[in-house]
């Protein structure tokens, strides 16, 4: 189905809107393929297509929702009637309004989609998964196998139309390689991921993905519990992305309005050093969450949340913006047609610095390079930001990697991490963890690393 055909379906729904109601129709036609390889052969291959329409009706400040995968006129009419019925029993809320049309300026949609992704044959997809699996297995004598060696791609056509005048569509392609290397030596076993993302297979780097997984797995071999100490902690980009997921959740206006955010009431306060710029940017076409408009048809935008370390505001969709008397930041999320819009970050990241990870590490006499954290979301308090999580990584001594560490705990709080952030690396990369978090190497001073005995690490 083309974007024009999908918009035609949505128009047929919106044309049925009554004078006393608002009607919005969101359509999605998405095809996804995943290939998993193991021991040089295909372990599984799946291809799925999702196509359907979600209908939102707003009447007398009440909202109702329904979706259908049957695009016949009768089914669309029935879904619209059910959405109306659901609205009739909804709870009135001033935030229940549909946005009007806003122009999408200066967004290069051509960079979202690479037609080459649709010319990749099933055999080529299988070869890609097997290639990254075999390259990882050949990564050295300590590599004992792989897990989750995968190639995946998707093509999404999204469209939206409403009785308030919104009418838009876009097409996006995504592709990735992911592999988890398993390493072993003298009874010590470790694992670590390698990842490559792009708009099509041609943008993926098999050798770099395998090498990343191998390097990250083997450097952790032989790890022991560290002594307890306060010291600088260097966060690997994967770990940074995980922590940013916690930060992003607290910066949505819904979390603030519900009293579940550690950032509530702090707009205008200096929360981090002046070199820190924390950004959400749905228009960053290189990010995996890039799109010209959000789940309500509002143009996406670059929103600077921490400007020179000062909190400037929160992320909004229309409902949260109405409640706060402000404008949507284009953060209505719509992963599918089967649910009404939510509120979430798009491409969320700390702007990178100018120093390489190696340069940051070289400046540290004694520190801890944190490569993995375990139980972050279950071990963190979203209201206070306090956390205590398991960690694994490598000690830094005299500016270079030293002994591996495992069975460690790092404890602190998100506010403390922001205050004590002393450097950001130049290695920003977007990772599909908790949304589309952009991780870079971070250095945080004065954190507690807990292990076996008290003393100098």
Image (cartoon, helix red, strand yellow):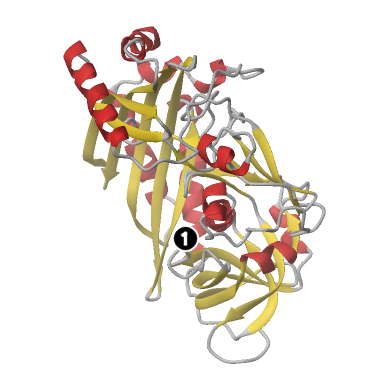
Q: Is residue 118 above or below residue 448?
A: above
Q: Which residue is mark 1?
A: 217
Which residue is rendered at x = 54% and y = 75% of the image? 405
Determine crowd level at label 1: few under 14, some 14-19, many 20+ residues with C-alpha closer than 10 A. Answer: many
Q: Between 258 and 307, which is closer to the camera in this rendering?
A: 258
Which residue is rendered at x = 80% and y = 58% of the image? 273
Q: Between 286 and 164, which is closer to the camera in this rendering?
A: 164
Is residue 226 in sight in this rendering? Answer: yes
- Indicate the quadrant containing the C terminus: top left, top right, bottom left or bottom right: bottom right
Q: Is residue 40 above or below residue 301?
A: below
Which residue is rendered at x = 31% and y = 10% of the image? 12
Q: Is residue 220 above or below residue 269?
A: below
Q: Residue furthest left?
A: 74
Please provide percent x and percent y for residue 417: 67, 65
- Asked whether, in this view, residue 85 is left or right of residue 213, the answer is left
Q: Quadrant of residue 36?
A: top left
Please provide percent x and percent y for residue 50: 27, 27
Q: Residue furthest bottom?
A: 454
Q: How many marks?
A: 1
- Asked whether, in this view, residue 321 is left or right of residue 21, the answer is right
- Asked whether, in this view, residue 202 is left or right of residue 28, the answer is right
Q: Between 453 and 49, which is closer to the camera in this rendering?
A: 49
Q: Quadrant of residue 90?
A: top left
Which residue is rendered at x = 47% and y = 60% of the image? 217
Please provide percent x and percent y for residue 442: 68, 58
Is residue 335 in sight in this rendering? Answer: no
Please provide percent x and percent y for residue 115: 44, 15
- Indicate the quadrant containing the N terminus: top left, top right, bottom left or bottom right: top left
Q: Secondary structure at mark 1?
A: helix
């Amino acid at each position: 189905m083309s974007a024009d055909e999908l918009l035609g379906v949505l128009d047929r729904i919106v044309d049925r809107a009554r004078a006393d109601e608002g009607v919005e129709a969101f359509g999605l036609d998405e095809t996804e393929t995943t290939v998993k390889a193991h021991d040089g052969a295909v372990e599984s291959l799946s291809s799925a297509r999702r196509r359907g329409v979600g209908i939102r009706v707003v009447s007398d400040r009440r909202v109702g929702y329904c979706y259908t995968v049957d695009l016949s006129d009768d089914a669309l009419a029935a879904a619209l009637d059910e959405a109306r019925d659901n609205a009739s029993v909804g709870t009135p809320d001033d935030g229940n309004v549909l946005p009007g049309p806003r122009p999408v300026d200066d967004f290069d949609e051509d960079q979202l989609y690479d037609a080459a992704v649709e010319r990749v044959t099933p055999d080529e997809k299988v070869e890609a998964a097997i290639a990254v699996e075999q390259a990882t297995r050949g990564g050295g004598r300590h590599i004992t196998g792989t897990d989750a060696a995968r190639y995946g791609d998707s093509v999404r056509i999204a469209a939206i139309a409403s009785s308030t005048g919104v009418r838009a569509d876009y097409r996006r392609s995504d592709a990735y390689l992911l592999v988890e290397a398993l390493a072993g030596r003298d009874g010590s076993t470790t694992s670590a991921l390698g990842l490559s993302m792009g708009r099509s297979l041609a943008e993926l780097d098999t050798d770099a993905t395998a090498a990343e997984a191998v390097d990250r797995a083997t450097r952790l071999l032989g790890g022991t519990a560290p002594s307890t100490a306060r010291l600088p902690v260097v966060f690997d980009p994967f770990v940074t992305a995980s922590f940013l997921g916690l930060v992003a959740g607290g910066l949505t206006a819904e979390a603030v309005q519900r009293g579940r955010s550690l950032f509530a009431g702090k707009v205008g306060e200096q929360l981090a050093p002046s070199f820190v710029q924390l950004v959400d940017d749905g228009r960053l076409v290189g990010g995996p969450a890039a799109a010209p408009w959000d789940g309500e048809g509002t143009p996406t935008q670059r929103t600077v949340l921490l400007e020179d370390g000062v909190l400037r505001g929160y992320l909004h969709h229309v409902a949260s913006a109405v409640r706060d008397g402000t404008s949507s930041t284009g953060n209505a999320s719509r992963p599918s047609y089967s649910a009404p819009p939510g509120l979430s970050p798009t491409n969320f990241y700390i702007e990178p610095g100018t120093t390489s990870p190696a340069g940051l590490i070289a400046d540290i006499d004694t520190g801890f390079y944190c490569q993995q954290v375990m139980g972050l979301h279950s071990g963190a308090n979203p209201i206070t930001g306090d956390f205590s999580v398991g960690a694994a990584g490598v000690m830094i001594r005299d500016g270079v990697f030293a002994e591996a560490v495992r069975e460690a705990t790092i404890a602190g709080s998100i506010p403390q991490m922001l205050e004590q952030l002393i450097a950001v690396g130049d290695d920003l990369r977007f990772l599909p963890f908790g949304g589309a978090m952009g991780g870079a190497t971070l250095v945080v001073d004065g954190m507690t690393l807990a292990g076996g005995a008290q003393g100098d690490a």
